[in-house]
Image (cartoon, rainbow, N blue to C red):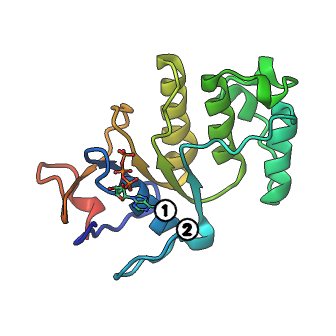
Amino acid sequence: MLTGVSFRLSPGQGLVLRGANGLGKTTLLRTIAGLQPALSGRIEGAGERAGYASHADGIKPALTVAETLRFWADLYRTDLPEDVFELFDLADLRDRPAGTLSAGQGRRLGLARLAVIGREVLLLDEPTVSLDAFSVKRFATFLREHHLGRGGIAVIATHIDLGLDLPELELEPHRAAPEAQGGSDEAFL
Ligand SMILES: Nc1ncnc2c1ncn2[C@@H]1O[C@H](COP(=O)(O)OP(=O)(O)OP(=O)(O)O)[C@@H](O)[C@H]1O
């Protein structure tokens, strides 16, 4: 159980959740996303504004990459961004059935959903699993330039360094507190 977790993020700010396996990062993200209730406390401003990316990519094997992205755009009633194929290195794969993608390619497609759904608050659970170093960099660029840079918010559980220089919240058993060292104060009010 996590207690004492408190943070507030403004437009353009991101936060990295750190902590050993089983400490509750997924639980916290799912709770913020509204997928499970908090035992106590308050979550404001996520709800309909939030998009949650879990370990699963939510891909339908029979749809092609392009059809998958179109499906998500229709589902969320957004316009499919022109640059999404390039952003996630999917241009050469656009007509491939999603079921034939490699793990990393499937992950890139799953993450591309985040560029399609138009949600201001992204809740990301180990988003870089299966990605090679090049794809990690591309994803970090997407987060920095296309999401945070345009006023989006992100909470990211990750064990790797995304190179985004974001404040970190180190989760501890039964207690959580922001890192004491400089640079992170403004993310916590
Ligand atoms: N459905 C469930 N029923 C019972 N216990 C659960 C359930 N889901 C998670 N837990 C437990 O809650 C705790 C927190 O799990 P959670 O998945 O949030 O951890 P995590 O920090 O995301 O871990 P990891 O780094 O391994 O992904 C763990 O002890 C886990 O076993």
Left or right of 6 in this view: 96: right
Under mark 2, the amino acid is Leu
Q: Position of residue 174 (x, y in %)?
A: 19, 65
**Residue where numbered disc 1 is placed:** 30
Q: Residue at position x 79%, y 17% from top?
A: 92
C-beta proximity under 8 Å, tags 1 and 2: yes
Tell me if the residue at label 1 has its CB under 8 Å from ligand 1.
yes
Task: Tell whether 6 sits left or right of 25.
Answer: left
Label 2 beta carbon within 8 A of ligand 1: no
Q: Quadrant of ligand 1?
A: bottom left
Q: Which residue is more in the foreground, 97 or 49?
A: 97
Q: Nearer the viewer, residue 107 or 121?
A: 107
Which residue is tagged 2? Answer: 35
Residue at horizontal 69 percent and vertical 45 percent from the top: 58
Task: Quote the CA–CA distance across marks 1 and 2.
Answer: 5 Å
Q: Using the rendered image of the protein, determine whether residue 79 is visible from the camera's viewpoint.
A: no
Residue 4, above or below 93: below
**In the displayed structure image, the side of residue 118 where residue 74 appears, left or right:** right
**Residue 178 coordinates in the image, percent (x, y):** 20, 58
Q: In the image, what residue type sits under mark 1?
A: Arg
Q: Is residue 1 above or below residue 153?
A: below
